[in-house]
Each structure stands twice: as C-alpha cells, then as structure tokens.
Image (cartoon, helix red, strand yellow):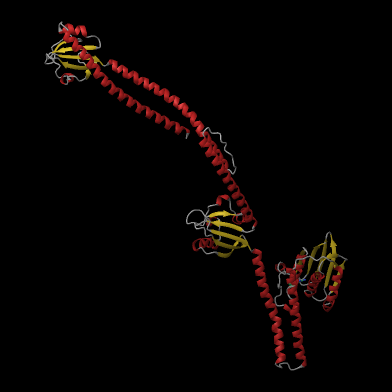
Amino acid sequence: MKRAIIRNNILLLVGAFMLFFIIVFFSLFAFEKRNQASFMTFILNEVEIEYEQYTGTDAAFVDDYGYDGRRITIMNEQAIVIADTHHNEVGYDESAQDEIVNLGTIASRTSAHIGEELLYMATQLSDGTILRVSITLETQTQLYSVIIWGLSIGSIIIIVIYYFGLKEVNKNLLKPWMKVKEGLLALNEGHYQVMSLTSPYSEINDLLYEMNIINEGTSKHLAQIEAYHHQLDRILNTLQQAVLLFNRDDKLTYFNQDAQKIFNLEDDDLDAPSYWFIRDNQLKNVIHETNQSQQDAIIDVVIDEHTYEAKTIYLNTYEEFGDKPRVLLILKDVTSQRQLEQVKRDFIAHASHELKSPLTSIRGNAELIEYDMLKTKEEIKKSARQINKQTTLMTALIEDMLMLSKLENIEEKPKNEHDLSSILDDVIEQLSIEAKNKDIHIHVTSEKLLLKVDPLDMYKLFKNLIENAIKYSDNNKEVHVTLKKIDRYVCFIVKDQGIGIPKEHQQRIFERFYRIDKGRIDKGTGLGLAIVKHIALKYDGQIALNSSLQKGTEITIKLHL
Ligand code: ADP
C-alpha cells in the first residue's frame, strides 16, 4: 500500500510537470513569436529610417548598418538582391521567399547562403526598393534550452524532495493501519488488543477509537461463543451417545468423542462423505433418505458386535446451499438393553412352555375325573396324585421364577450377619429324606461363618447345589459338602459322584431353563443353577465348575468375607 501510494503520487506529479512543461513551452512560444514580430518590425523600421536618410551607396549602407547577428539585404522592385551584409555576391532573385511574398510578416528558415537558422522580415519602400532584415535564431534557441534545462532540473529536485516528504507522510498515515492490522490479528486469535490513539491525524484517532469499541464488543462475543461452544462440546461428549451431523450432500460436518470411537474418525474426516466411514448400508441409506425426504427415522444397527439405536433427525435450517448441517444422527448403545429384551422374550417363551406341560397334565386328569372315566378308586387316587405332583412342580416353577425376578430387581445388599453353617444344617436336614431314598450319604464339613446375607439366598444356593448333586447321582453314591473360610473368602463346595456334565454343556447350564436331558422336566424346573448364578452375582462371588462324565461334578462358590 505504501509503495502504491508513493508510486501513484510520483506518477501524478510527473504528469503534472509534463503538462506544466507543455503549457509553459507553448506559452513561451506564443509570447516569443509576438516578441519576435515586434522586435523585427522595430529593427526593420529603424533600418528603413536610416536607409532613407543615408546618402551613400547600397553596398556602403549594408556595410555600415549590418553587423554580426543582424543581416540587411537590399533588393530592387523585382526582389533581385542589390546588396547584402553577409553576402558579397548579388543579383540573385529572392522573390519566391515567404517574407517577400508576404511583406511585413516573419519567416524563418536556414539561410542557403549563410547556413544558419534566421528570422526574416521585409518591407517595400515608396520607390519600390525592398529592404529585408534578418537575425539569427541562435539567441532564441539558447533562451529556450536554458528555460527547459532549468525547468527539468528544478522538476527533478522537486520530485526528489516530494518523494522523501511523501514517504514521511505515508509513514505517519500508515502507522495507525498497522495497529489496526495487529488489533484485528489479535482478535482473530481471540485476544482483545487496544489500539493506542497516537496518530497525528485526529480523524484517524477517531476511527481507531471506534474500532477499539467494535473490537472490544466483538472479542466479548467471540469469547461467549467459544465458551458456549466448549460447553456444548462437553455436553455432547458426556451424553454417552454418538452425535454426528451431515450436510445436504451427506458429508460429515460434526462428530463428538463417542462417534469418533465408534467410526474411528479423525479430524481429517470432516467433510468426508458418509460412505467413507460408515460400512453399514442400512445406516448410510437412512441418512440419505432423511436428507432427501426430510423424515426422521430410527433403526437398530450392529457395529463391532454392539447394537446401536440409530436415530436420524432432519434439521430444518432453511439453507439450500452451503455446509449447514441438515441431518443429525444419534447412536445409542443398546446392546445390553436389547440382550435383556431378548432374555425376557426367551424367558416368557420358556416359562409359558414350562407351565404348559403340568397344566396339560392337570387338565387331562381333571377331565378324567369330571367325565367319570376312572372306574376304580385306585385310578382316581392315581389321577389326584398326578394333579398334586404337577401342581407341586408348577408351584416350584413359579417360586423359582419369582426368586429370579427378585434377584434381578433388588440390588440392595443385606445389612445383617447370619451364620452360614446353621443355614447349611437346615438344608441338609431338609434334603436328608431325598438322600436317604437313594442311599446317598452326604458328608458335611462346615465351620461357623458370619456373613451379611439374606438367609433365603443362602438357603436357596445351598439347597439347589446339594439337591442337584443328589438328583444327578445314582444310588449309593456319596456327596461331599464343604463350607469353610479360605483366605478372605467363604468357600462352599459340593462334590458328587454323579453322572457328570458333558464339556459342551458346561458353559450353558447356568442359563435359565437349560437342561441337558430336555425330556426330564420332572427332575427340576431348570432354574436352579440360574438362581445360584444370580445369588453369586448379587454377592460379587465367583463360580467354578469341574465335572467329568460318569465320574462326578464339583461346584465351588466363593464369596467375599
Ligand atoms: P434342574 O432343575 O433341571 O436341575 P438346574 O438349573 O439346577 O436345573 O440344572 C441345569 C441342568 O444342569 C440340569 O438339568 C442337569 O442336566 C445339569 N446338572 C446340574 N447339576 C448337575 C450335577 N451335579 N451333575 C450332573 N448334571 C447336573
């Protein structure tokens, strides 16, 4: 800018000087012409007067009155030269010359006889004689060149002085703009910098003052926007949901930290089209469709074994062009929610199925009695026993289901301590008949152990495991039950010599309604080990299973003391 101002000013000045030269030159020229005319007329008059008074010959006259720089020529009526100051030879004809043709006017040309640039003027006397005077142009030319040189040198000096003066003025003029530049740059980086009002020009100081006010306001606004931006970012990053924004071309314009993790995004991916980082076709399509149809949508997508509920929302930004976000995509991890829903669905299906068998049996037996199909007392008794058995099974099933539901829903830990060994004694006593029926001997090793538990939980845990050991053992086998403290744990171990659990089923026997022998519903509800697992989970315990076919099973439960 500084250079441009200097260059333009100098060009302007040079132009002005050139114009000035031309005007001066032509004015001088016009003035000189007028001057020459009166000068020549004066000389011619003087020569004319002197000639008329002169009594000598023409040749003597030109000798006496002609001198260097002033040439006198005397011609007859036909303009034939009679005498000439600068030329001895006479008799030549000058009638064609301009000053002769136009008497009383000035003519200028290079003299053929003298070889110099001369000015001519002639007049005719009353006797017909023509008198002509001529002077050299040299004096005029010299004057012109002195003037031109003087003007040129003067102009150059003026231009040089003007250049340095201009530079200084420029410096003062531009200094405030540098401050404005610094102020704006600082503002761009988020700082507010006051521009000092030190310009020698009050107008510039006024401007700087106004700009300071604007800058202060702008920087406050910028700080507010930045704070708002940070706040929004923090909120979006703590949502535990992935948030992404897409423009009208399905290009990414924003993503939060969760989105970054799910799609492995980097800052460079901003402005990338959705298909660059989204593999799932359904998700890509739903973004595109929301963009086109302006309709929100919800779908479930699976990304890296996680199930996400993907919600697209059309943002009505009233922007036809540009990079404004148009589609908001929110992904919520619903993996456990969906698993739970599936578990619930399975549970309901299983529970209905489990309840159906005893109900069918009860109904069948009831109908036999109702329609007098049973003849003997013994038959009626058998049906009644069957109804009783199925009812007991159903009751056990419902009790187990309620127990499971309670374990899943109540997370509060018990506050009172109970002696586990006395609970175990109760269980052993309860199961002693069952064991006796199969001639199974239960060896119990236990010690008094106080733990903050719900006694019903421990009762169920001990009972389910010992009952299974009896149920899945042949007659005359032995079951070893141990309750003891090892390090900082309570260990409860049930070891039998039963049929054992095949390897491929060992992972799954703790699932609800999972039975190895699907046909043996009468053996149990299929919920026993699921309840054991939930009780262990409730007390942050661990379960270990060790079993081999036809040799026996050992299940260990470890609970923190
Ligand atoms: P159930 O009511 O059928 O016993 P559980 O959940 O208690 O249901 O056990 C699930 C399945 O695990 C049983 O059906 C059985 O096949 C197997 N099982 C459990 N305990 C033992 C064991 N001690 N020995 C062999 N198999 C067992």
Nearer the observer, 441 or 219 = 219
* Quadrant in the picture for residue 432: bottom right
Nearer the observer, 48 or 442 = 48
Q: Residue at x 80, y 63 (%)?
A: 559
Report the quarter where the C terminus lies: bottom right
Quick check: 380 left or right of 18? right
Q: Position of residue 369 (x, y in %)?
A: 72, 91
Q: Residue at x 51, y 31 (%)?
A: 172
Q: Position of residue 501 (x, y in %)?
A: 74, 70
Count of numbered marks: 0
Ligand 1, seen in the image, is in the quarter at: bottom right
* Quadrant in the picture for residue 313: bottom right
Nearer the observer, 3 or 454 = 3
Asked whether the viewer can see residue 138, the reply is: yes
Quick check: 3 left or right of 149? right
In this rendering, is residue 22 above or below 208? above
Quick check: 399 left or right of 486? left
Asked whether the viewer can see residue 84, the reply is: no
Q: Position of residue 193 (x, y in %)?
A: 59, 40
Q: Position of residue 242 (x, y in %)?
A: 61, 58
In this rendering, is residue 455 above or below 143? below
Nearer the observer, 328 or 88 = 88
* Quadrant in the picture for residue 54: top left
In this rendering, is residue 18 above or below 57? below
In this rendering, is residue 159 above or below 137? below
Residue ranking furthest to the right = 448
